[in-house]
Amino acid sequence: MQGVALITGGASGIGAATARAFIQKGVRSLVLIDVDQTLLDEFKSTVLYEFGLAEELTILAIQCDVTNEDRLKIVFREVVDRFGRIDYAVNSAGITNKSKVGEYETSDWDRVINVNQKGIFFCMREELAQMEKQDFLDDQSIDKRRLQRGSIVNVCSINSFVAAKRNAAYVTSKHAIVGLTKTCALDYALQGIRCNGVAPGYVETPITLAPENVEVLRKSTQPEKTPQGRPALPEEIADVIVFLSSQGASYVNGAIWEVDGGFLCL
Ligand code: NAD
C-alpha cells in the first residue's frame, strides 16, 4: 500500500494500532496527531525501533488539540509541506465522560462534543481541502476507475446506533458523526474521495481499561451482550480501518462498518 496516512488520536489505542497496521501494509509516510506529547514521543520511538531503521519509515508526530482550528491549519500546512499529499485520513481522537443527562456540567458536555464531534469536523475540513487539490493516487495494478484522491475513515462506535446509560454527551457525539460521515460521502463522491466510518464495540484500550470503566468492559463483553464473549483487540479495529481506507474498498462509501463481535445483532 502506497501513500501518506494521517491519524488523529494516533498515539494510543485504536489510533496507534491503525498506525502499525498501515506500516504493516507498506505505508512509509505517517502523520500522527495527538494532544498528548508524551504519548506521541513514546509511541513514535517504539514504532521506529520496531519497524523504522530497516524500512525507511518517516513519522511526523505532531502535538495538537483537534478542537483548536487555528493550530490545525498550521499543522496541516506542515504536513503538506513535508509529504505533499494525504491519502488516508483516520479520525480517531475521542474522549468520554459520564453523567446522567440532567446532571452534566456544561463544560463537561462541551468538552466531549468539541473533541468527538466538532474536532472531527475541523480535521475533515483540512483533510478534504488537501484531498480535493491532489491527483488520484496512482496504482497500475487496478482498474483506473477504482483510483481515489483520498479516503477518510471516522471512528464511530456502537453508541453511534444505541444509547449507553450515563453517557449522553458521548452517545450524542457518536450519533452525529454518522450524519457527518454520510454527508461527506455524498458531497465528495464525484471527486474521488470516499468517507466511511467504523463502529467498534468494546475494545481493550486505555479508555476501557481505566479503573472506572473496567467493570463495564467485563460485563459488556459477556456473551449475552457481545456474542463473541470478549473485547476486541485494537488491531481488530485497525485492520478494518486500513482496508476501508485502501483502494480495495473502492466502492464502499458512506458506510459505517460495525466491528463489534456481534453486539448490535442482539
Ligand atoms: P485512547 O484514549 O486509547 O486514544 C484516544 C487518543 O486520542 C489518545 O491518544 C488521546 O490523547 C487522543 N486525544 C484525546 N483528545 C484529543 C484532542 N482533543 N486532540 C487530539 N488528540 C486527542 O482511546 P481509544 O479507545 O483508542 O479511542 C479511539 C476512538 O475510538 C475514540 O473516538 C473512541 O470514542 C472510539 N471508540 C473506542 C472504543 C473502545 O472500546 N475503546 C469503542 C468504540 C469507539
Image: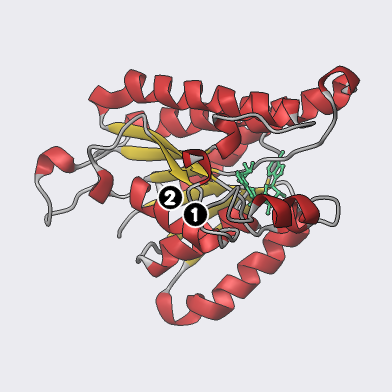
Q: Is mark 2 within 8 Å of ligand 1?
A: no
Q: Which residue is drawn at 25% across and 39% down?
A: 148
> Measured along the vertical axis of the image, is residue 78 above or below residue 10?
above
Q: Which residue is drawn at 80% across and 31% down?
A: 166
- Determine which residue is flagged by label 1: 237
For mark 2, does the 10 Å Cα neighbourhood hold few (<14), some (14 to 19), or many (20 or more) residues? many
Measuring from the top left, give residue 233's x and y in whole percent.
Answer: 56, 62
Viewed as shown, does residue 162 lie left or right of 178?
right
> Measured along the vertical axis of the image, is residue 30 above or below residue 67?
below
User: Which numbered tag is attached to residue 241?
Assistant: 2
Residue 11 in view in this figure:
no
Which amino acid type is shown beneath numbered disc 1? Answer: Ile
Q: Is mark 1 within 8 Å of ligand 1?
A: yes
> Measured along the vertical axis of the image, is residue 119 above or below residue 82?
above
Choose mark 2 or mark 1, whichever is in front: 1
- Which quarter of the picture shows residue 144? top left
Q: Do the residues labelled 2 and 1 touch (CB within 8 Å)?
A: yes
Viewed as shown, does residue 124 lie left or right of 38?
left
Q: What element carries label 1?
A: helix
Q: Residue at x 42, y 29 (%)?
A: 128
User: Which numbered tag is attached to residue 80?
Assistant: none
> Measured along the vertical axis of the image, is residue 44 above or below residue 36?
below
Q: What element carries label 2?
A: helix
Residue 99 in view in this figure:
yes
